[in-house]
Amino acid sequence: MDDDTPQLSDSVAIVLAAGAGVRMGAGIPKALMPLAGRPLLSWSLLALAEAGIADVVLVAPPGEERPTAMALGEVMRDCTVVPGGANRGRSLAAGLAARPETAEIILVHDAARPLLSADLVRRAVAGLSDGDGAVVAAPATDTVKIADDDLQIVGTADRSRQWHAQTPQVFRGPAFRGAVDAAAADGFLDEATDCSAIVERAGGLVRIVPNTAPNLKVTTPADLALAEQLLGG
């Protein structure tokens, strides 16, 4: 086996669960909402454990670290829980800071995507190959129109080249940390909605890991209901 082949045993997973879930209207953090008999975030942790990733940092809503840790129960007893930041980028930085700079492979996943499977985790890590990053993504099925401020269409994007980015996203530790540090220095970290964009911006090579299996992001009550149906099936 090539020494550069990514190994699950060398991977650290950062699970982002710091969102308040305002659109859910539940009064508790979205990651702690019940889903098919367990907290929403537990489904992602179960998939990571099944895939063989034992080193996990869970980024919780600030002030909710203790309730979050208690909600984990026996799903992942040794999971490190840290408080998140004011936005996704700052929460990511908090998760990175909880692990030594020697971490070789860093996987980032949104807890709001509870349909994560062990197979998808393995494919994401394997997709890193010789690049700096690998992003799970679904091929676009809708045509994207480009419009100006007056909603007049000014162009039509080539659907054959479009992909909808999801998580998990996997990165080489040194390249990822360097890209995050650079983004923090120039303010881009506060704007980034996607980890791979940070690495791309730094000139890193990022590849897509195609995914057609359900991997929805729970944002609204309707999403939660659909996720429950899919998990039940």
Image (cartoon, rainbow, N blue to C red):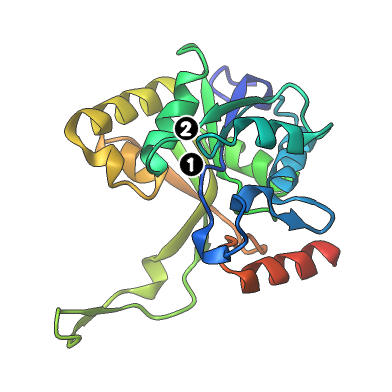
Label 2: few (<14), some (14–19) or many (≥20) C-alpha neighbours in 10 Å: many
Quadrant holding the C terminus = bottom right
User: Alpha-carbon distance for marks 1 and 2?
Assistant: 6 Å
**Residue at coordinates 66% horizontally, 64% vertically from top-left?**
214
Q: Are marks 1 and 2 in contact (CB under 8 Å)?
A: yes
The picture places residue 169, in percent across and down from the top left corner, at: 51, 42
The picture places residue 76, in percent across and down from the top left corner, at: 77, 30
| Nearer to us in this view, 222 or 140 | 222
Secondary structure under tag 1 reads: strand
Label 1: few (<14), some (14–19) or many (≥20) C-alpha neighbours in 10 Å: many
Residue at the disc numbered 2 = 171
Kind of residue sitting beneath label 2: Phe
Residue 202, by quadrant, is top left
Residue at the disc numbered 1 = 134
Secondary structure under tag 2 reads: strand
**Residue at coordinates 39% horizontally, 66% vertically from top-left?**
162
Q: Is residue 91 above or below residue 165?
A: above
Q: Is residue 225 left or right of residue 84?
A: right
Residue 230, by quadrant, is bottom right
**Residue at coordinates 48% horizontally, 41% vertically from top-left?**
134
Q: Is residue 99 above or below residue 67?
A: above
Kind of residue sitting beneath label 1: Ala
Say if residue 133 shows up in the picture.
yes
- Going from the N terminus, do you reach mark 1 or mark 2 first? 1
**Residue at coordinates 72% horizontally, 39% vertically from top-left?**
45
The picture places residue 179, in percent across and down from the top left corner, at: 31, 29
